[in-house]
Amino acid sequence: RKAQKYDPNKPVPWKAGLTREEAKERAADTAEFFQNFQAFFENHQFETDEDRVECLESAHSNLLSLLDGDADLLNHKVVGAGAEFLIKVSTVGQIRRLFQRIGGNFSRLMCGGGSSRVVELLLSIVFSAGTDLLEAEEAGEGGIPSLAQLVCRLVDEVASDVPDVFVHTFGSFSLRMLVRVLGGLPAKEKEAAAAAEDRPVFIGELNRICAQVAAAVSADVVGTCQETATNGCLQVVVEVLATLHRRAAEYHSDPAFDELLVTYRGLRDSVLAHFATLAAHQTSARVVEAL
């Protein structure tokens, strides 16, 4: 399958019975709200932290109610940018609530031009959070799962869709971010490796994602290694698995790690079986080098 670009004109399953005209009107209203909110928030001097949080709560309330009707609004350029701004200035509790609310839509959102950036930002926050924040569950928040639990739920949701997300232009970027976060590596490749120290590794969840990637690769080794979208994601998968392979002594007591090693070796064998062809191609050679 060739990588697909997100088509903004392609019909989407509008929720809550919205017509396309109603959806466009809602998107325009939401875009105006975010433009006004960001201008206000950046220029207003809040007297107390409580006032600041209350302002953010109001914005989150508006966003969550809109997402209940149509999560695809995040693909609107201004709405997506507004959601990114809101996430960056929000509390961890607010982010967890948003993370939970868009559950059930992650596979689709990972493949949207604007929504994929929102998903990637949420994942980068998961990596940046300390262990205490990752595992924290605040009783006063209506039973909202911890960030760690939310990541596991995301994997539960998207695992079966990995073959489709893997070949998608935008989805492959979101997938490589997810793989790095699950592997405890910096969300961005240019970040210092030291930033990954003491970060949790989601061994079982990582294997579920990587096993799907490995299966897709074995079905078309040359194609996935040479196609731009899948090549970039595959390089990250190999990098993460190779890094953990070198640190095997740290995880010898975890049965799930043995399964991860099986996935890594299977992927490595699939690639090396076509070594001459892949090494001779400028794009696929990067995967061979990563091994």
Image (spheres, helix red, strand yellow):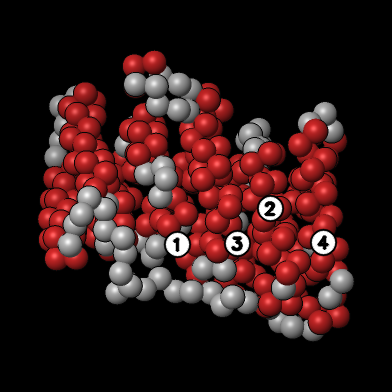
Query: Mark 4 is on which residue type?
Result: Arg
State the CA–CA distance, disc 4 to disc 3: 18 Å
**Structural crowding at the residue carrying mark 3, measured as other residues with C-alpha within 10 Å and reported as few (<14), some (14–19) or many (≥20):** some
Q: Pointer 2: what residue?
A: 210
Q: Earlier in the sequence, mark 2 or mark 4?
A: 2
**Structural crowding at the residue carrying mark 2, measured as other residues with C-alpha within 10 Å and reported as few (<14), some (14–19) or many (≥20):** many
Residue 9's place in the image compared with 242, above or below, is below
| Disc on res. 111 | 1
Q: Earlier in the sequence, mark 4 or mark 3?
A: 3
Q: Pointer 3: what residue?
A: 163
- Quarter of the picture containing the C terminus is bottom right
| Disc on res. 268 | 4
Query: Mark 3 is on which residue type?
Result: Pro
Q: Position of residue 180 (x, y in %)?
A: 61, 50
Q: Nearer the viewer, mark 3 or mark 1?
A: 3
**Structural crowding at the residue carrying mark 4, measured as other residues with C-alpha within 10 Å and reported as few (<14), some (14–19) or many (≥20):** some
Query: Mark 1 is on which residue type?
Result: Cys
Query: Mark 2 is on which residue type?
Result: Cys
SS at badge 4:
helix
Q: Is residue 106 left or right of residue 167?
A: left
Q: Nearer the viewer, mark 2 or mark 3?
A: 3
Q: Position of residue 97 (x, y in %)?
A: 35, 33
- Quarter of the picture containing the N terminus is bottom right
